[in-house]
């Protein structure tokens, strides 16, 4: 049961990191428009601004949960 939780948290963490990375990549390469130069595509910023404004908190919580679950397995 605990290893299933660990695998799920690792998958979610990798998915969130990929979303943040792709947002920066797509604006730096010019694939998506970013008028205010904050490395968040304008189309994403309109719909998911909460996701990008809470980036620090989301990554902190995922890190805590990941560390706690790794500690439980090891």
Image (tube, rainbow, N blue to C red):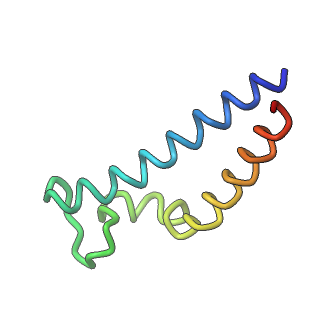
In the image shown, does 6 or 50 lie closer to the viewer? 6
* Vertical relation: 4 (above or below) 14: above
In x, y percent, where is residue 2? 83, 26
In x, y percent, where is residue 72? 86, 36
- Indicate left or right for 4 with 21 as reference: right
Residue 6 position by quadrant: top right
- Indicate left or right for 58 with 20 as reference: right
Residue 41 position by quadrant: bottom left
How many numbered discs, if any? Answer: 0
Looking at the figure, which quarter contains the C terminus? top right
- Indicate left or right for 17 with 70 as reference: left
In the image shown, does 58 or 42 lie closer to the viewer? 58
Q: Please give the name of the residue rendered at 66% of the width and 61% of the height, measured from the top-left corner.
A: 60
* Vertical relation: 50 (above or below) 16: below
Q: Residue furthest front?
A: 74
In x, y percent, where is residue 44? 37, 57
- Indicate left or right for 22 with 7 as reference: left
In x, y percent, where is residue 13? 58, 43
Q: Please give the name of the residue rendered at 33% of the width and 50% of the height, measured from the top-left corner.
A: 22
Q: Please give the name of the residue rendered at 16% of the width and 53% of the height, measured from the top-left corner.
A: 31
In the image shown, does 51 or 59 lie closer to the viewer? 59
Looking at the figure, which quarter contains the N terminus? top right
Q: Residue furthest left?
A: 30
């Amino acid at each position: 049961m605990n290893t299933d939780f660990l695998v799920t948290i690792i998958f979610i963490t990798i998915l969130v990191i990929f979303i943040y990375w792709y947002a920066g990549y797509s604006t730096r390469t010019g694939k998506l428009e970013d008028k205010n130069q904050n490395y968040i595509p304008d189309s994403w910023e309109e719909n998911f601004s909460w996701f990008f404004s809470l980036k620090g908190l989301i990554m902190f919580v995922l890190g805590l949960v990941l560390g706690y679950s790794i500690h439980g397995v090891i």
